[in-house]
Amino acid sequence: MFTHLKKSVVTIFIFAFAIKPLISQPKYDFDFNKEWDWVELRYGGYGLTADANAILERLMPSMNISDARILFKALSQLDSVNYVKKISGIAEYDLPENREKNKARIDSIFRDFCVQNTLSGLVYAVELIDALKNKEEFSGKQFTDRELHLNIADTTGIKIDMRFDYSKAITTLDLLNKSLITESDIENLAELYEAEVGTYNPDSIAIIVNHAINSSPLFSIYKWIFPLSFKDLGGVSLYKEKIRSVLDKIQAKEDVLRIDIQNRLFVFLPKYIDYTSEVEFVIGSNLFPEISNGHKIPVNIEFFGDNYEQITKYITRKLFRQGREQVTLNIFHHLYTGNDSLLFIAMNSVQEGGMLNYIAPLSVENRPSSLLEKDFMHFRRTVKEIEKGKDKKLIDTLLSNGMYGNLLFHTMGTQMTFSIEKVVGKKALKNSLMLGPASFFKNYVEAYYEDKKNIREIFRFTPEFEIKIDLMNDIVPEYLFSEVVEIKSKSGKLRDTAKANFVNREIQKVLKKFSTDRNSDLLQLLISRLLFDMGYYDQSLVYFQKALPSLKDKQRSLKLEIYDHISKSQYSTALTLANEYIKYFPESDDSYLTRAEIYYRLNDFDKSITDLEKTLSINPYNEKANSLLEKVRQ
């Protein structure tokens, strides 16, 4: 370990020595070490050429003064402004996935760069460097020294259990203030991140962080262009004092943020929701393997800067998804099969994105009516192609364009949410959280029939799709959902034995109440999901097995349920489900492969090999089985 550290320190020392001839005292008439401004630089009589003045005129509105100070200062410290072309060499110290592309980008601009070593030459270099920077990545623009003033009052009268943890961000910032990072520093940070020994390489991480804190001119310019360099710590190192100031302000006014988040959350969510969450302010990208924890919300503060309202909206959106899980029972993937499963994906994106944008919009712009028309047109086309079911690639593209990128489904959903709230009422929106997107769409159809004047034809659906909405809504009986969800909500504050006894008692009451109901099979499925969500996996399995004979697509349902149990490390129940899978589909290579994967996770390699051999006897070309078999035999 110490040998590796010695090598890394030597590497840093040699590199620092190699670049030393590039550094000198400022030789320009302008002093870039002070807190200068654009007006002084441009109009201070420093002999700038007409071209340089024109460049500054273009840069002033777009380049943040903090960024300008960092960049001009670093350039002014080079022996010659033409040495800027050497920043391509810094790419060799970045992560492997960044090296070639970053070097190529720099060389494409600066390979033949040559200017006079004057203030105007410095301005020419800045223009080219600015063109290299990806404007969507974080920069000094995120930090405007604003104060934390959210003009809000508590409208909920409750206080959710939400803790703000600054330790990871502050410890990382402290590291970035050091002159040299050691393996011991990384191990201390890893302990804070709960990273297990053996899951990370302290030597390689120390090297990355040491490059991130390198303040030499070439490194500073490289980090300015590529703030995501060195696992995002390159850019963070340039703005570390501003980031610390943001954290200090949040820490001083936590209650203000908490009230804003609560006000937004409970617009649609019921106040009985049991929130136990921890907001973790973090810095940098994946220094250590991620540990899944549903109650923790990581917030990379460098991407928000001092936009405190956006921080609260981001946290709200994360908490809303947690809360939504408590007011519904997600059995929809068992109910909607075939093309309807794809329709559900699109409709769910519309509902969730729309309701999130209603309570916590990340964009401050109002979408023009002409673009909203395109959103609805895109959705209608997506529905049409899904129902035709011929071109899978086109369907995937349409879904992707709606759910990601410009988020066409989300902006469409926002408009639908406003219309439902205005015409049908907020209660309908709250119920749709429990009943799913078919209910949300049904409410919207009701809204546009009641308000034909304001909701134009372009913002409506075809008669055929309206019928489809009704059919999808009919298989989600509200009376059953509400009965079982109520068990979930009432048990939220209970713990351990009291909770288990209450849940079992209420389940028996519901089963007795609906023993002769035509949807009794669906009730078994709802209870299974209720128990799964609450962590009673063995009991959940029993009710799922009772519901299984009535499910339309048993193969899909079994696979989904198996991987739900695997995701919770419940390999015993997953194995029982895999046996059911083989019982129903004995000729399927996938059924044996699925069980083989579970045996592998259980370290029962002999049984895993037996199932893999069976898989390959059914389908010799199953690449996944061949790959796993090779892995097991090692």
Image (cartoon, grey):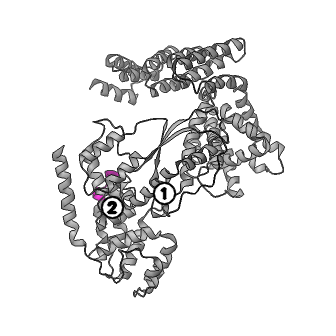
State if disc 1 and disc 2 touch (CB < 8 Å): no
Residue 571 shown left or right of residue 548 in the figure:
left
Q: Which of marks 2 and 1 is nearer the N terminus?
A: 2
Q: Name the residue under label 2.
A: 103
Image quadrant where residue 612 sits: top left
Rendering coords of residue 282 (x, y %): 42, 48
Name the dominant secondary structure of the magenta segment. helix
Q: Which residue is drawn at 43% across and 64% down?
A: 133
Residue 113 shown left or right of residue 1 in the figure:
right
In the depicted structure, whether residue 274 falls above or below residue 80: above
Q: Is residue 284 visible from the viewing direction of this image?
A: no
Rendering coords of residue 329 (x, y %): 61, 27
Cα distance in 3D space between marks 2 and 1:
28 Å
Q: Residue at x 38, y 26 (%)?
A: 625
Q: Mark 1 points at which residue?
A: 305
Q: Is residue 95 magenta?
A: yes
Residue 483 shown left or right of residue 178 in the figure:
right
Q: Quadrant of the C terminus?
A: top left
Image quadrant where residue 545 sits: top right
Q: Residue at x 60, y 46 (%)?
A: 259
Disc 1 residue type (three-letter): Gly
Disc 2 residue type (three-letter): Lys
Disc 2: CA contacts within 10 A as few (<14), some (14-19) or many (>=20): some
Q: Is residue 536 magenta?
A: no
Residue stretch rendered in magenta on the structure:
91-97
Rendering coords of residue 353 (x, y %): 62, 44
- Depth-wise, is mark 2 or mark 1 nearer the camera? 1
